[in-house]
């Protein structure tokens, strides 16, 4: 191969390779700017966050995080003088703004809801998905292809279209704004992804393993539990992370079907209001805490990303 | 994605045979992929001899819960929506009698100029997001496929935005788009010399449709890129070598080998993205909530208004069914085209 093979994947030329690297690195850096910006905004004071020109160098402050987790009330200097000295650093920080902490904010609660609903629905959809995927992969099921297609087509509905009857249904059976209702709904949405992804993973496990186990006197069920399941571990973990990320990120259903008790973080974060407009550092802090787990999971998942985002249609 | 040596282990099994819209092909290709010929030859005797539940019973036991769940939370509500679409039901006045209005709701939806406006806005959004994402996504994939040092790490960095919550992304982009203090305006101002406070991405009728296109492109280009990259990596080296032996220049090679072989992947990426963007709600609602006026009011946003603000449950059910049929029909036609491309 000589330097003329510029367009060959076999051996790109040196300059082309350098140029390609440079462009991709620049793109990657530019694409990170919004994320980095919201991250550092979380460590600014409200004044710094809205300064012009935008401040890149500033004195870091935890005010955004304190504001995110507390509700505060403004007090008169006279009242402030009567208070005993602040006990904690966050008390002190809030008092330096002529305010006192009135109590915890709802963010912790909403974050907890995201965790409960996310993990609950992930567990259920992976459980159901594993069983169904195994059956679809190993047994001859009448109309299997139609069933699989039906399972997938449920994803094509616009979420608002699904939300109309679900709203009426949940109102009738008393599941509106409950954790259980949201877990059931997210499980339903995720189970299609789980079945399709996991079927791909089961398909890749040679049948000989189970057949050997069956000959050894295992029942079908034992063979599934003791032979196939351990082989599926990676696939199950990857699928679980995809389900978790979906449930974590979901907004439309959460907005329309929850209002308080079971509301998750996505509809809540944009409503964080400070004095005189949106409290950007607190929003930055909330966004950072909310996105961080997803970023970590994405990096863990990178080998399976392709499969996950295409429902197993493209594998590497 | 990580390693330089990452190769498509199962490229033969990539989309060509595994497109999910194409169920009749999945079984054969799947077994092909794992290359187990023995699979279908499982002796019936073994199956019958095992103690415990029969395979048939296990199969149904394993599938039933999923099917029951989907019937209860997906199919039943869908049928209910179809029923509601023929009535004048209002969810906030449940006590009021429900009247059968026939096709009235459908006629009203299809003759409503606001809804046609929403479809135009959705079309504009779809057209431009797809164009930008395909061009940038394919370009990036092509560059990454040059396997420069450290491409694995940078690829992972590029992929990050697509896994985030669209609503939260929309929310923090409103901060970047602030006319004076926003970083986006500042950077644009810095490079073009325009006063950063002289334009409003979200507040202006001319710019708002582009504001949503930019954010969606920022977020979802990695998606198209990742699928294109899989396509590029599925092209075996010997084809390029053969082309070189035949004296094909770089342009010719790109045009006659690279592009056609990536096309099925690219089309699959566009299919998934287009379905998602046709349903688009969360990102745009948080970003512009359809405004200013209704210049960024996508179909789903208006559907939400009709259903959950004006409480016209019957009408919005008809609207929802029309949207569903549209996306379903368009996807089916597209998949036919996709199959034709892959068979070439």
Image: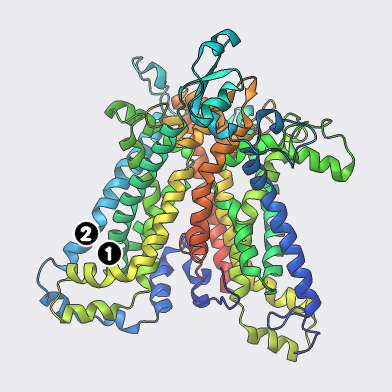
Question: In terms of secondary structure, where does tag 1 sit?
Answer: helix
> SS for tag 2?
helix
Residue lying at the far right of the rendered structure: B193
Residue A128 relative to residue B249: left or right: left
> In this rendering, does residue B309 appear at all?
yes
Q: Residue at x 39, y 45 (%)?
A: A118
Q: Relative to residue A126, is residue A304 depicted above or below? A: below
Observer-nearest of B14 and B317: B14
Q: Which label number is shown at residue B60? A: 2
Q: Which numbered dot is residue B8?
A: none
Q: Which chain is home to disc 2?
A: B
Residue occupying image coordinates x 20% and y 78%: A213
Reply above or below: A83 against B182.
above
For the N terminus of chain A, the quadrant is bottom right
Q: Is residue A266 left or right of residue B161?
A: left
* C-beta proximity under 8 Å, tags 1 and 2: yes
**Quadrant housing residue B147:** bottom right
Q: Give the quadrant of residue A75.
A: top right
Q: What is the chain identity of the residue bearing mark 1? A: A
* Residue A135 circle label: 1
């Amino acid at each position: 191969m000589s330097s003329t093979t510029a367009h060959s994947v076999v051996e790109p030329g040196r300059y082309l390779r350098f140029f390609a690297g440079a462009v991709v690195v620049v793109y990657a850096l530019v694409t990170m700017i919004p994320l980095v910006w919201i991250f550092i905004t979380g460590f600014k004071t409200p004044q710094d966050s809205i300064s012009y020109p935008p401040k890149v160098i500033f004195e870091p402050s935890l005010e955004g995080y304190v504001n995110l987790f507390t509700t505060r009330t403004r007090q008169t200097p006279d009242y402030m003088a009567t208070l005993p000295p602040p006990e904690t650093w966050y008390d002190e920080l809030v008092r330096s703004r002529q305010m006192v902490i009135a109590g915890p904010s709802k963010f912790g609660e909403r974050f907890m809801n995201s965790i409960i609903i996310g993990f609950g629905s992930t567990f259920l959809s992976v459980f159901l998905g594993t069983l169904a995927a195994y059956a679809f992969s190993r047994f001859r099921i009448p109309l299997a292809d139609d069933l699989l297609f039906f399972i997938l087509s449920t994803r094509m509905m616009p979420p608002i279209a699904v939300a109309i009857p679900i709203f009426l249904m949940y109102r009738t059976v008393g599941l509106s704004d409950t954790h259980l209702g949201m877990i059931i709904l997210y499980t339903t949405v995720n189970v299609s992804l789980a079945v399709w992804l996991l079927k791909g993973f089961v398909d890749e496990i040679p049948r000989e393993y189970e057949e050997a186990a069956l000959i050894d006197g295992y029942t079908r069920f034992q063979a599934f539990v003791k032979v196939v399941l351990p082989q599926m571990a990676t696939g199950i973990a990857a699928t679980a992370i995809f389900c978790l990320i979906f449930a974590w990120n979901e907004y439309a259903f959460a907005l329309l079907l929850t209002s308080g008790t079971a509301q998750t973080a996505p509809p809540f974060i944009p409503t964080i209001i400070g004095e005189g407009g949106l409290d950007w550092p607190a929003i930055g802090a909330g966004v950072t805490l909310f996105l961080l787990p997803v970023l970590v999971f994405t990096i863990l998942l990178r080998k399976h990303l392709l499969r996950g985002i295409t429902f197993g249609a493209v594998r590497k | 994605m990580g390693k330089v040596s990452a190769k498509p282990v199962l490229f033969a099994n990539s989309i060509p045979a595994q497109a999910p819209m194409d169920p009749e092909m999945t079984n054969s290709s799947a077994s092909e992929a794992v290359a187990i010929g023995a699979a279908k030859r499982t002796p019936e005797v073994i199956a019958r001899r095992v103690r415990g539940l029969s395979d048939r019973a296990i199969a149904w036991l394993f599938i039933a819960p999923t099917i029951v769940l989907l019937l209860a939370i997906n199919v039943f509500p869908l049928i209910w929506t179809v029923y509601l679409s023929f009535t004048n039901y209002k969810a906030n006045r449940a006590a009021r009698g429900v009247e059968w209005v026939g096709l009235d709701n459908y006629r009203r939806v299809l003759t409503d100029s606001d809804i046609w406006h929403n479809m135009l806005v959705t079309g504009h959004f779809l057209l431009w997001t797809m164009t930008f994402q395909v061009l940038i996504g394919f370009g990036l994939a092509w560059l990454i496929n040059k396997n420069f040092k450290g491409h694995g790490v940078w690829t992972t960095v590029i992929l990050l935005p697509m896994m985030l919550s669209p609503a939260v992304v929309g929310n923090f982009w409103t901060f970047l788009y602030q006319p004076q203090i926003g970083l986006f305006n500042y950077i644009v101002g810095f490079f073009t010399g325009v006063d950063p406070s002289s334009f409003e991405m979200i507040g202006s009728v001319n710019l708002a449709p582009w504001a949503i296109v930019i954010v969606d492109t920022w977020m979802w280009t990695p998606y198209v890129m990742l699928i294109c990259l899989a396509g590029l990596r599925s092209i075996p080296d010997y084809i390029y070598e053969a082309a070189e032996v035949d004296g094909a220049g770089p342009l010719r090679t790109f045009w006659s080998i690279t592009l056609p072989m990536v096309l099925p992947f690219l089309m699959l990426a566009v299919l998934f993205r287009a379905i998602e963007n046709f349903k688009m709600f969360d990102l745009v609602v948080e970003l512009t909530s359809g405004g200013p006026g209704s210049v960024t009011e996508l179909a789903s946003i208006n559907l939400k208004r009709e259903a959950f603000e004006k409480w016209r449950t019957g009408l919005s059910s008809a609207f929802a069914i029309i949207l569903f049929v549209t996306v379903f029909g368009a996807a089916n036609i597209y998949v036919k085209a996709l199959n034709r491309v892959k068979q070439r």
